[in-house]
Image (tube, grey):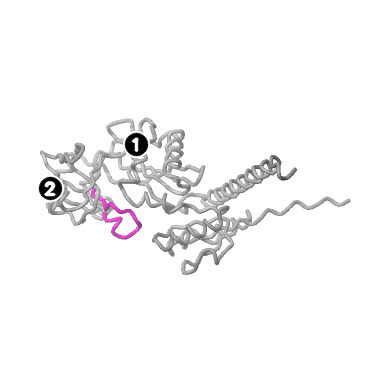
Amino acid sequence: MPESKAEKPCIFRVGYALPTRKTDAFMVEPFITYAKQRYIEFIPIDTTKPLTEQGPFDCIIHKLYGHEWNHNLEHFFNTNPNATIIDRPSAIQRLHNRISMLEPIAQLNIPNINIPSQLLIQDLDSFKNIQTADQTIYTTNQTLTRLTFPLIAKPLLADGSTNAHNMSLVLNHAGLTKGLKLDPPMVLQQFVNHGGVIFKVYVAGEYVKCVKRSSLPDVSSEMMEKMELEYPGGVMSFSQISSAVIAGDDAWDGDKKSEKPKMPEPEFVVEVANGLREALGLHLFNFDMIKDDKSDGYLVVDINYFPGYEKLPLYESVMVDFFLDVKKSQEEKKKMRENENKNVDDHDPTQA
């Protein structure tokens, strides 16, 4: 009797709704082909039509925002409760605010991880509560917040718009009150010397990868004096800083003999990543972390949703493994529901 052929795995259909630039970078042919070999099919979503009229989808990935899109997703989930949405808009929304995105860090209860001191400037009237003493600014609105120059000024909203990346280094009080081009609402974040290195930690489900990237150079007191002379307005945009670094400006040379921060311990990175994944309720995100040069601790300065995984080596296999884990989780939940229903039927006296 001939042996029966192994059952062919079911196709796992992933619908995607991404901005054009994200689609061009992420949905490349080698990735799509590799996914097909693992029985994963990617299906582009027409955002002008209801999701319930497309598909079928086992999973949806997206990086679109807006009330109509959120309603479309909610309606799809209500009619397809077995499907997985990566990720729920309510969880993503938290990352669009630079104050709320970092709040979970304090709840992790993990030693040596924190956030920089920061101050929310909600409107122009908020500036009236800021007082200056030498190189320190402070406010006594509700709780005392002290910041020292230089500061990083960031828009409060981190929604992917062009303005969201309009950041500046504020050198002194004049820069804060006169030279700053950014309008409230904004966040003033303490600049911390960190060896000119930032650690970007990518999370995709259970996968965690930390990479080292160049960041803003350290700022010494001597460098502050030079920059204040060169920029009498008291403000440097991030584009000006990048240009100075590329050009080898003496103001950014710093102590060339200083040792660059080493990669954080993998166990520490995974612990923080796992804590944030649970606290945020997200599957796909990354966070930027710096090493405080005055302590043994690290500071999380930013969290982004659905970052550029395509920048990672072998990202195709990383993301395919992620989708296979989602598929496995769905199958396990399905079996659990079937067993629960079976147990109910077994104990139902009406079935006797």
Q: Quadrant of residue 143?
A: top left
Q: Which residues are magenta?
A: 152-166
| Residue 155 painted magenta | yes
Q: Earlier in the sequence, mark 1 or mark 2?
A: 1
Q: Tell which residue pokes out farthest to the right in this image.
A: 1
Q: Which mark is on residue 313?
A: none
- Residue type at the position of mark 2: Lys
In the image: residue 160, left or right of residue 125: right
Q: Which residue is mark 1?
A: 106
Considering depth in this image, is 21 or 93 the residue closer to the camera? 93
* Residue appearing at x 19%, y 57% in the figure: 181
* Residue appearing at x 55%, y 53% in the figure: 81
* Residue appearing at x 20%, y 46% in the figure: 251
Q: Quadrant of residue 278?
A: top left
Q: Is residue 116 above or below residue 284?
A: above
Considering depth in this image, is 105 or 271 the residue closer to the camera? 105
Q: Which residue is mark 2?
A: 128
